[in-house]
Amino acid sequence: MEPNVLLALLFLVGAAAAAVIFTLVFVRAADRRLADSEADDDKQRDEERESGDHAGEERS
Amino acid sequence: MSEMSSVESREPKQPREGIYSSSRVERSITVIAIAIASIGLGYLFFTQLWWKAPPTFSCTEDYAFSQASPEGNLAREPGLCGWIGIEAFYADKPRELFSANIIRSNPGPELSIPIGIAQQANGAFIENVVKPNIRWFGYVIWGTEAFIFLSLCLGFMSRLGALAAIGMSAQLTIGLAGIPQPYEWEWSYQTILLLSIVMFGLAPGRYFGLDRLLRPRLMALSERGGKFSRLLLLFT
């Protein structure tokens, strides 16, 4: 096999591996980020509910 | 009325993205057919990488292009430069695409799309951009075809890959489809172009490839204001 063809084949294999690795890393990072942001949303919602309850108690 | 409401109740309120078929068998047929077409088109581009492998793209040492001989015939050169020269040679010889010769006794087709203006534009692009920069532009051509192969076979950023396939096949169709010498059957190129358009519409990675993993996360992130995610979402 000619060296330039071998190099081109290696490039394609490397690019394919890079695409798979990028996808797996992105999936893991995105899942973590989305879980964190969902937890933050829940926390904020709880805090808002609690502050609403306090306001209700003070009014009564 | 009751029949209509029962049909409505059977229909999902929000169709699942990409796959609208109702049964598992239907969905499997759709996914398998799209995967075969996408991988097949990607493989076509893979097969065309090797006769023009870098760094020389199988051109002569001085990167000579095919051109008109003193007698006006086509004098061919090898490799990518040879085919680019052929496109330039035919750029000022108007052709028609999607030709249908319905009445056989009539010379020429009754239905066709003339592409003279597109040929001239393609010829100007070849003469002014491709030919003077072939030493690096060859890498752009080779790299684009390699990307199309990877994108359509892995289902990775497949809408972008299909868009690149449309660009590449449209350029080849304008440049080479239906030329007489060497004879290039116009439907070879037109079929690749039409299949690329179908792949662009379907974005095949949503059915079988890496885009299936990427897309739901990109959608969730872009809904939360991620600009990079929104950009990548367009490519999947």
Image (cartoon, rainbow, N blue to C red):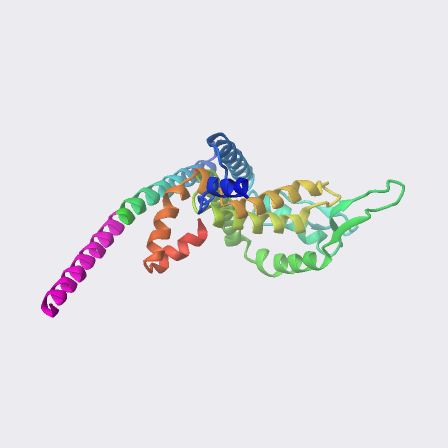
Q: Residue furthest bottom?
A: A59
| Residue B175 magenta-highlighted | no
Q: x and y percent of residue B216 in the render?
A: 37, 47
Q: Nearer the viewer, residue B24 or B80?
A: B24
Compared to residue B208, the image places residue B227 above or below, namely: below
**Residue A56 drawn in magenta:** yes
- Left or right of B137 on screen, residue B96: right
List x then y, in percent, for residue A37: 24, 54
Residue B6 percent coordinates (x, y): 50, 40
Quick one: B124 or A58, which is closer to the camera? A58
Where residue B89 appears, x then y in whole percent?
71, 52
Say whether residue B64 is left or right of residue B68: left
Name above or below for residue B128 compared with residue B107.
below
Which residue is at the front of the view, B153 or A5? B153
Residue drawn at (72%, 55%), measured in percent from left and top? B115
Say which residue appears at 75% left-offset and 44% top-offset.
B180
Number of numbered discs: 0
Q: Could one spot residue B92 in this view of the protein?
A: yes
Q: Indicate the quadrant containing the N terminus of chain B: top left, top right, bottom left or bottom right.
A: top right
Tell whether B21 sits left or right of A11: right
Looking at the rendering, the stretch of residues picked out in magenta corresponds to: A32-60
Task: Tell me which secondary structure the magenta stretch mostly adopts.
Answer: helix
Going by the picture, which residue comes out furthest to the right?
Answer: B105
Q: Residue furthest front?
A: B2
User: Can residue B60 be seen here?
Assistant: no
B109 lies left or right of B157: right
